[in-house]
Amino acid sequence: AQSVTQPDARVTVSEGASLQLRCKYSYSGTPYLFWYVQYPRQGLQLLLKYYSGDPVVQGVNGFEAEFSKSNSSFHLRKASVHWSDSAVYFCVFGSGTYQRFGTGTKLQVVP
Amino acid sequence: EAAVTQSPRNKVAVTGGKVTLSCNQTNNHNNMYWYRQDTGHGLRLIHYSYGAGSTEKGDIPDGYKASRPSQENFSLILELATPSQTSVYFCASGEGTINTLYFGAGTRLSVL
């Protein structure tokens, strides 16, 4: 079935450190992939999306993601995290019908 | 500013009662969606709509109905609420599956 898997339910990083949140997808073709972020007590907002072209896509607030067909992955990265990046991050697969969400990774940025 | 507005923001219901969650969008999007969010499951799609008068089942439609009376409004109806439907519900609008979804702030529903 077409889906995404986020293997890490929680990630803790120090402020100023680099970040990678992992996402693996299951699909034989080239997927539409998204990363959304949910800040505490808020709805979700788009960080970035990918369909084709340059495998590295830039998003808001310094986030980027790299698509890898060989690894079936779409990992999210940031060079230096800030305490305000603490949130839940969702990797999302866009099918022909609707978008399917991963289970999310809760990021905690500590001093 | 384009927006998705959900009401109520919080709701406490009794088991067996009827609950209606409402969603209004000013994005003029054709597609609207209802998701529920539970720990360990992420967001799961309940119902969606391609436009006024249409509703489609998502991945977990059992126990829920949906209504899309107009382009702007999309409701989720729990005819006989159960404690297992305690969750946070999100409405979203968008234009197709490859485009950005715009979410409301969510409705926290507790069924006692």
Image (cartoon, coloured by chain):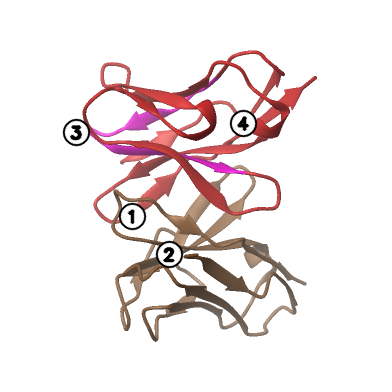
Chain colours: A red, B brown
- Measured in 3D between alpha carbons, the distance from the residue under mark 2 to the one under mark 4, in whole angstroms, is 25 Å
Name the residue rendered at 61%, 61% in the picture. B105
The quadrant in which residue B58 appears is bottom left
Question: Disc 2 designates what residue?
Answer: B33
Question: Disc 3 designates what residue?
Answer: A29
Question: Disc 1 designates what residue?
Answer: A98
Q: Are marks 1 and 3 in contact (CB under 8 Å)?
A: no
Residue A27 colored in magenta in the image: yes
Q: Earlier in the sequence, mark 1 or mark 4?
A: 4
Q: Earlier in the sequence, mark 1 or mark 3?
A: 3
Q: Amino acid at mark 1?
A: Tyr
Q: Are marks 2 and 1 in contact (CB under 8 Å)?
A: yes
Q: Are marks 4 and 3 on the same chain?
A: yes
**SS label for mark 2:** strand
Return the chain for callout 4.
A
Relative horizontal placement of residue A44, taking residue A40 as reference (left or right) = left
- Measured in 3D between alpha carbons, the distance from the residue under mark 4 to the one under mark 3, in whole angstroms, is 27 Å
